[in-house]
Image (cartoon, helix red, strand yellow):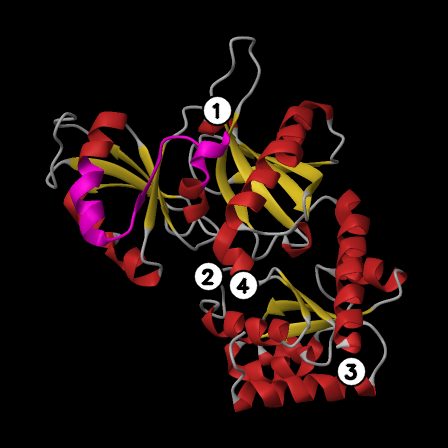
Amino acid sequence: MKQLNLKALSFVATVVAAMSADSIVKIALLWPGTRQMRSDATPENNRLRPLFEALSRLGTDPEPAVYSDEFADEVRDQLVRADGVLVWVDPISAIGNRTGLDAMLREVALAGVYVSAHPDVILKIGTKEVLFRTKHLGWGADTYLYESFEQFREQFPARLGAAGPRVLKQDRGNGGIGTWKVDLLRGDRESPHADEMVHVQEARMGSPKEELRLGDFMNRCEGYFTLSGRLIDQGYEPRAAEGMVRCYLVHNRVVGFSTQQARGEAQFGMIRHKSMYEESEAQFQTLRAKMESEWVPAIQHLFEIDTNSLPVLWDADFLYGPKTARGEDTYVLCEINVSAVFPFPESALPKIAEATAARVFAAKEARTDG
């Protein structure tokens, strides 16, 4: 075990003192915001109100914890007096990126506070790299990983020419930010070069379709390697216009579904109509069985994640793959969301609350025994 520095030892002492002062099981629900939002936050005046109520019914004491890097120390002091924290902060949000937050959450977790989702678990399954690392599990497709800008510039043109439209994804992002559909407009598909013209469109809401040189577009992507050091490349799924299925999970069990369908002529991006379904929805039972019996156990084994360390709430997004010979749907993983899953089916609330309470009670007991 690594030796703790003086700062970490002081932090642990603060936690122990906080535990002695208060025997109530406290759970912080954390989301990004301003100083004023933090001052005004109550369990009743935010979108997570139903979860606050569900946690309260189980005998816990949930409290809001609005976060910004500007007052990170204040939030840290709040979290050390809690027994658990559930986090809703996107990789890219109003507070910037999660670098400071994730460092704080690791420190809090080290002291015995239950954190979901833990930043280390996010790095394993909540980045786009998971699409490449798990493509052999049965939910993957034509997927590649570029680990440098030079590799991307060297390999992407030929892949675009040979395989048709591609979807590029920065490793950490949300809301369609840094996700691009790229297709050759004209020219030599056998050996395309940097001067070929391409159509590109980002998946974030309202993004227009652009026409530009392939080389210029690739230069635009250089910044993604600065941010995360990698870029993921998937083939564009022909059935993408039919929409997407989101599978919600609590730890290793499916707790609901949603569908997102394009409106009007939208073929790529975030302009969607969403419908929620309970986990028993008949049309998704094949997907549910695959998730619970095959795919989730496989990623747990691959990334060495025990069930209790899986997030209390996470989801997997699927595009429709080629139909089978019998006309049945197949599914292709589009992304896994771990950082800030919302909205979710109302029917999932009790399961989220129960799993959270179980983990937090266990963490509190372990800290008390320790």
Q: CA distance from mark 1 to mark 2?
A: 29 Å
**269 to the left or right of 287:** left
**Residue denoted by label 3:** 19
Q: Residue at x 71, y 64 (%)?
A: 46
Foreground tag (3 vs 2): 3
Of callouts 2 and 4, which one flags the residue occurring earlier in the amino acid sequence?
2
Residue at numbered disc 1: 321
For the point 49% across and 36% down, which residue is it?
333
Tell me how far mark 1 sits from mark 3, CA to CA.
51 Å
Quarter residue 197 falls in: top left
Real-space Cα separation, disc 2 to disc 4, in angstroms = 14 Å
Instruction: Identify the image quadrant of residue 308.
Output: bottom right
Residue 275 at what x, y percent from top left? 66, 36
Say whether residue 266 is visible: no
Considering the numbered disc 3 on the image, is that residue within a helix, a strand or a loop?
A: helix
Per the image, is 46 magenta?
no
The residue under label 3 is which amino acid type?
Answer: Met
Q: Quadrant of residue 1?
A: bottom right
